[in-house]
């Protein structure tokens, strides 16, 4: 019931924020987000490498979503192949232009039950699972919104190397030996297609040298790993002088962010950020189990919500961020999850 209420409130907020209530006046059309971006940023090619590391130990616990690692290359100028451009430009959801960027990622996720010391895991708790994947995302700025289109492929199961990786990590930071990996999900190829739309600067305010923005978003993901619809919003508070920076990258499913920052050499900046996202989940392989083989599974929750808050610091080409994340119960008998995320970004 709480999730229904939260999603309803979120829908009302999104509907309000995506109107033209914040136009400069009734006689003068407000600038779009694309028009607000300085020519210096539009014309300059910037490339970023970002390392993201998520772990529930950052929040003082070790259960459920136990670890996520992601390395990403982000290029703000990308020449889309002509046949891909023609295909996308004939759709209503994505238009290629001179503000189209590309993001390549390689990631690895680990999921375990709360008690990792028993050889036969609790059948009512989250199954053991690992996910090794790569993804490519195209992003474009069009008018007042940003469209993201992402394709992810990978493998779930023993071939994703969850057992040796967790055993190696625990040999360094935890005396407990994860004993139940013989009962993990079986090998299954992974494929997902995700679309997301965001409205940066839909509501923004500059006061006393500081800039506040609220960015609503919605999206849909289809695939044998995740299938869900999402609705959310993020906020950010930054120095007005260095307002052209995004919230940090996260391991998906997550509240949006791409890790972009436009900070001059030898300059220092910071930002405070947070957000909320609700998801209606039709499939989550890490709870539902394998698609075409018998495997451990639990009864998942259809409605799941995330909230986060964090801070980042930037000095010239380097940015570091810390985010604390709260996720509602994902399955019957589960608990609210809390985990932290560290990221380090470098502008090439």
Image: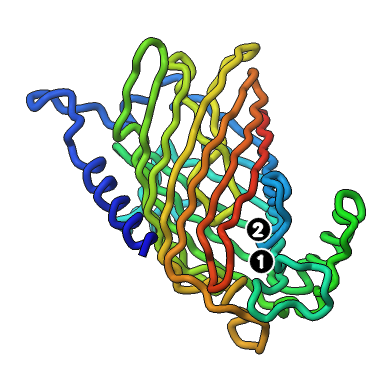
The answer to which of marks 1 and 2 sits earlier in the sequence is 2
Residue at x 73%, y 74% (from the top left corner): 157
Where residue 45 appears, x then y in whole percent? 54, 29
Q: Is residue 231 left or right of residue 62?
A: left
Where residue 161 appears, x then y in whole percent? 80, 66
**Residue placed most toward the observer, 258 or 89:** 258
In the picture, the disc for residue 154 is 1
**Residue placed most toward the observer, 95 or 195:** 195
Where residue 203 sits, quadrant-wise, is top left
**Residue placed most toward the observer, 345 or 4:** 4
The answer to whether residue 6 is visible is yes
Where residue 219 appears, x then y in whole percent? 40, 56
In the picture, the disc for residue 303 is none
Residue at x 84%, y 66% (from the top left corner): 178
Residue at x 69%, y 41% (from the top left corner): 51
The answer to whether residue 197 is visible is no
Where residue 76 appears, x then y in whole percent? 52, 36
Where residue 200 sits, quadrant-wise, is top left
Vertical position of residue 202 compared to residue 148: above or below: above
Quadrant placement of the N terminus: bottom left
In the picture, the disc for residue 134 is 2
Task: Classify mark 1: residues with Cα within 10 Å, few (<14), some (14-19) or many (20+).
Answer: some
Q: Is residue 82 left or right of residue 225?
A: left
**Residue placed most toward the observer, 131 or 58:** 58
Looking at the image, do the residues carrying marks 1 and 2 touch, with CB atoms under 8 Å apart? yes
- Helix, strand or loop at label 1? It is strand
Task: Classify mark 2: residues with Cα within 10 Å, few (<14), some (14-19) or many (20+).
Answer: some
Q: Is residue 107 left or right of residue 158?
A: left
């Amino acid at each position: 019931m709480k999730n229904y209420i939260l999603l309803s409130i979120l829908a009302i907020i999104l509907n309000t924020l995506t109107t033209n209530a914040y136009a400069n006046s009734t006689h003068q059309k407000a600038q779009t987000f694309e028009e607000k971006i300085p020519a210096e940023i539009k014309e300059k090619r910037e490339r970023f490498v970002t390392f993201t590391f998520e772990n529930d130990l950052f929040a003082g616990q070790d259960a459920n979503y136990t670890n996520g690692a992601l390395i990403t290359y982000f290029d703000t100028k990308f020449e889309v192949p002509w046949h891909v451009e023609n295909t996308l430009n004939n759709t209503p959801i994505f238009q290629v232009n001179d503000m189209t960027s590309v993001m390549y990622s390689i990631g690895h996720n680990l999921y375990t039950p709360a008690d990792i010391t028993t050889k036969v895991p609790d059948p009512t708790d989250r199954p053991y699972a690992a996910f090794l994947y790569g993804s490519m995302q195209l992003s474009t700025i069009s008018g007042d919104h940003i469209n993201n289109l992402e394709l992810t492929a990978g493998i779930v199961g023993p071939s994703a190397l969850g057992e040796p990786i967790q055993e190696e990590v625990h040999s360094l930071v935890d005396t407990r030996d994860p004993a139940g990996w013989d009962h993990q999900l079986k090998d299954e190829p992974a494929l997902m297609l995700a679309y997301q739309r965001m409205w940066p600067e839909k509501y923004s305010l500059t006061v006393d040298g500081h800039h506040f923005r609220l960015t609503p978003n919605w999206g849909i993901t289809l695939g044998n790993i995740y299938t869900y619809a999402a609705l959310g919003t993020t906020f950010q508070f930054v120095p007005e002088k260095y307002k052209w920076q995004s919230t940090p990258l996260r391991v998906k499913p997550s509240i949006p962010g791409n890790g972009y920052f436009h900070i001059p050499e030898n300059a220092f900046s910071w930002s405070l950020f947070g957000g909320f996202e609700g998801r209606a989940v039709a499939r989550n392989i890490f709870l539902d189990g394998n698609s075409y083989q018998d495997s451990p599974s639990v009864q998942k929750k259809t409605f799941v919500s995330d909230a986060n808050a964090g801070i980042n610091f930037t000095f010239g080409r380097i940015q570091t961020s810390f985010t604390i994340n709260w996720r509602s119960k994902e399955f019957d008998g589960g608990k609210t999850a809390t985990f932290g995320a560290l990221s380090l970004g470098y502008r090439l």
